[in-house]
């Protein structure tokens, strides 16, 4: 597996060589240069350094991110008080793919070093799981709730109703909400889209799965369809297989689109 590491400025500037001013979500970088002249000098140095490293493998990695058949966006938070931001992106074309992971930065608006790696399509699901903090599967049984019974707010938002004492007669929706209201160590979304884009990720219907890692418990997945939402323990293998299926479906959509 070929891999590369870049400081965030170099990764941002590298995209200019491919005609892109703003790299893909969820990459973030905010310059700390004090003047415009200083920033331009740093950009020039970064561009020179990138060109010296640009070979066939690295060119292929950027070309794949520019024109994928499927895209996977992973974004969330981990640590006490959501201290660190999780950022990763996977682009898939044919039997190969490239995964980007950005280290946490000084704050939620600016990330750290960027790591790129070439992988196989078969490894997409497992690579997405590796972008998340390690966590054992949750110990509670699966819950299936009707969407219409759930609070319309985001499942990860705080809600005073989650603080009520447990009730053995609670509905699935109430148990669902109370579990997601417990202290967590990590949470976020994994979104899968078909087709190619850089500036906008939401180019059509998203296939997604959410994760939430509960303190002193483990990882749960939140998976929805048109009528129900399920909360279930999230072993790494199960999550990886689910993501792999979502990516495969997105690729099928891309290949079924008419050629203009």
Image (tube, rainbow, N blue to C red):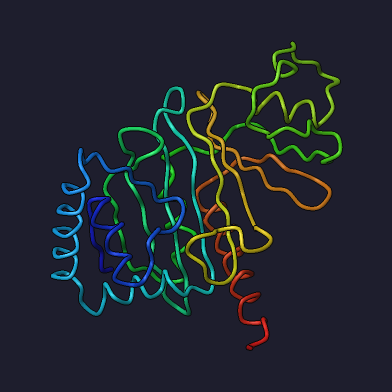
- Total residue callouts: 0
Image quarter for residue 134?
top left
Depth check: 23 or 182 in front? 23
Rendered view: 85 above or below 191: above
> Which percent across, then down, holds residue 104?
34, 39
Does residue 215 appear left or right of residue 13 in this picture?
Answer: right
Image quarter for residue 165?
top right
> Which percent across, then down, holds residue 146?
84, 40
> Which percent across, then down, holds residue 97?
41, 70
* Residue placed furthest toward the top: 165
* Residue placed furthest toward the bottom: 260
Does residue 169 appear left or right of residue 153 in this picture?
Answer: right
Depth check: 135 or 207 in front? 207
Q: Residue at x 41, y 73 (%)?
A: 64
> Which percent across, then down, holds residue 45?
13, 58
Rendered view: 139 above or below 75: above
Quadrant for the N terminus in the image: bottom left
Quadrant for the C terminus in the image: bottom right
Q: Residue at x 58, y 60 (%)?
A: 192
Q: Residue at x 48, y 73 (%)?
A: 68
Rendered view: 153 above or below 43: above
Does residue 119 appear left or right of residue 177 in this picture?
Answer: left
Q: Residue at x 46, y 75 (%)?
A: 67
């Amino acid at each position: 597996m070929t891999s590369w590491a870049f400081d965030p400025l170099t990764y941002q500037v590298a995209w200019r060589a491919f005609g892109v001013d703003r790299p893909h979500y969820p990459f973030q970088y905010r310059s700390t240069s004090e003047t415009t002249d200083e920033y331009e000098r740093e950009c020039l140095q970064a561009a020179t350094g990138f060109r010296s490293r640009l070979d066939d493998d690295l060119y292929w990695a950027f070309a794949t991110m520019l024109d994928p058949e499927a895209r996977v966006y992973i974004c969330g938070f981990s640590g006490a008080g959501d201290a660190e931001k999780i950022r990763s992106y996977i682009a898939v074309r044919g039997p190969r793919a490239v995964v980007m992971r950005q280290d946490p930065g000084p704050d939620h608006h600016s990330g750290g070093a960027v790591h790129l790696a070439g992988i196989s399509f078969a490894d997409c699901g497992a690579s997405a799981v590796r972008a998340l903090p390690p966590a054992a599967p949750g110990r509670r049984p699966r819950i299936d709730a009707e969407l219409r019974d759930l609070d319309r707010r985001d499942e990860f938002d705080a809600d005073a109703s989650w603080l009520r004492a447990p009730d053995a007669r609670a509905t699935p929706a109430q148990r669902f909400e109370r579990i997601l209201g417990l202290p967590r160590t990590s949470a976020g979304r994994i979104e899968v889209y078909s087709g190619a884009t850089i500036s906008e990720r939401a180019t059509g219907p998203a296939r997604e799965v959410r994760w939430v890692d509960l303190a002193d418990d483990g990882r749960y997945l939140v998976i929805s369809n048109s009528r129900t939402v399920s909360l279930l323990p999230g072993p790494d293998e199960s999550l990886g297989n689910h993501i792999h299926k979502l990516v495969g479906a997105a690729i099928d959509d891309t290949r079924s689109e008419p050629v203009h």
